[in-house]
Image: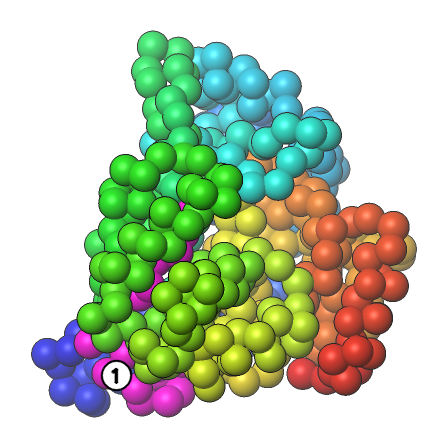
Amino acid sequence: MSAASPQEAALALQEQLRPWHEAIARPEEAQQSVLRRLLHDYSRTRYGSDRGADNIAVTGDNVIAAYRQAFPVMTCDDYKPLIARVMEGDVGLLLCEEPVGWAITRGTVAGESKFIPMTATDLRMRVSAGRAMLEYVAASSRLDLFAGINLNLNFPATVGVLRVGHRELEYGYSSGIYTKHVSAFTPIRSVPSQDEIDALGGGTTKRDWENRFALAYERCRDENVTLVGGVCNTAVQFGRFLRRKYGVYPKKVWNTQVMTLGSTPGINTRHRPELNALYGPAAIREIYGATEGMFGQQKDERRAWVPNYDLFFLEVQTRAGIKMLHEMRPGEVGGLVVSTPILPRYRIGDTILAVRPPYYRCIGRERRGTLFRHAWDELVTLNLGRL
């Protein structure tokens, strides 16, 4: 991209962002199209075929109603026995293509990590996380960002090996798997490489992370770091590590342009002051995703993310019942239900706030106290619901 003229680069950026922009402008039409595409994939699995996915796909205007009637909303516990059967080798139960790896959650559900299969189609969709960076470059015309590198602070892509039928597949964390498989298709190089991170092992102790942070600093201290991407809390911990271990702040080492961060609520409010104190006045762009997929990213200076209506089918369970995400009213909250190439109508466990559609925030898990915690954070940060 750096060899192109500014005009050519601008056109290339707009072309990559066009499907997202068009879906934002016409979410109802985009979601209908996504659902029909997903139903085609589901019809090639036994779970989907048993529910008549192929017949639903050719339904007229009532395709969404027919989909909801045939496919129930499922939780992690509901899917757990089905995923266990896939892990035992019954791939066609849920997948229409072979898995390329398995992702595990950083948190736990009922005291244990979730395992989610990842396919080639799924990984290609995760490239959408780069839209936040591309949108920033398109708006700012800072094409020099691509001349630098991305400081890679992601979790390991390889933690262990699972036997799936007669095959052995690696499992690790989704952010690392994403970086390992799709970094070749992104316009900026990630350093250290995911292979270098994986070589340090899959541990998550303080010592393990200090080893990864030391590697990142040694590999990047003489590089032009223009982008920092990954988990927000990891970026914060890395900045603190540099100050404690080497006596420097990241802002004294690099002139970072933009930080694309996810995995925790309040990135633009509660965490922004410390991020700016550590990294300087870099633009902050929030990524909203989970082990199951990348569902949205920040589009502009407004401090909320915008859904990937062109990639995933997105519903929300509200007090008034199930509705499409794009149908939410400003100030309304509910539990997100996602349909991915692997999981139809999966209630992911996140509480979503419609700030002013198409702008949304994930304000925490679906737990008692989440709304109070969000209200308190808005008060102490003086954000008070502002975009």
User: Can residue 13 be spotted in the picture?
Assistant: no
Give the residue at x 37% y 66%.
246
Q: Which residue is mark 1?
A: 143
- Can you give x and y, in whole percent of width and height, for residue 273 in the image? 60, 79
Mark 1 belongs to which amino acid?
A: Leu
Question: Would you call the spot at circle 1 few (<14 residues within 10 Å), some (14-19), or many (20 or more)?
Answer: some
Position of the N terminus by quadrant: bottom left
> Does 70 appear above or below 244?
above
Relative vertical location of residue 325 with respect to residue 94 in this rendering, above or below: below
Relative placement, left or right, of 326 versus 244 is right
Q: Position of residue 88 (x, y in %)?
A: 48, 12
Asked whether residue 147 is drawn in magenta, I would say yes
Image x and y of residue 291, in percent:
53, 44
Residue extending furthest left?
A: 3
| The C terminus: image quadrant | bottom right
* Residue sitting at the far top: 166
Residue drawn at 64 percent across, 24 percent down: 80
Q: Secondary structure at mark 1?
A: helix
Residue stretch in magenta: 133-155
Query: Residue 241 lies in what quarter of the image?
Result: bottom left
Examine the rendering and report whether any part of residue 225 can be seen. yes
Residue at horizontal 32 percent and vertical 76 percent from the top: 253
Can you say whether 95 is above or below 348 in the image? above
Q: Nearer the viewer, residue 131 or 384?
A: 384
- In the image, taking residue 270 as reference, residue 248 lies left or right, namely left
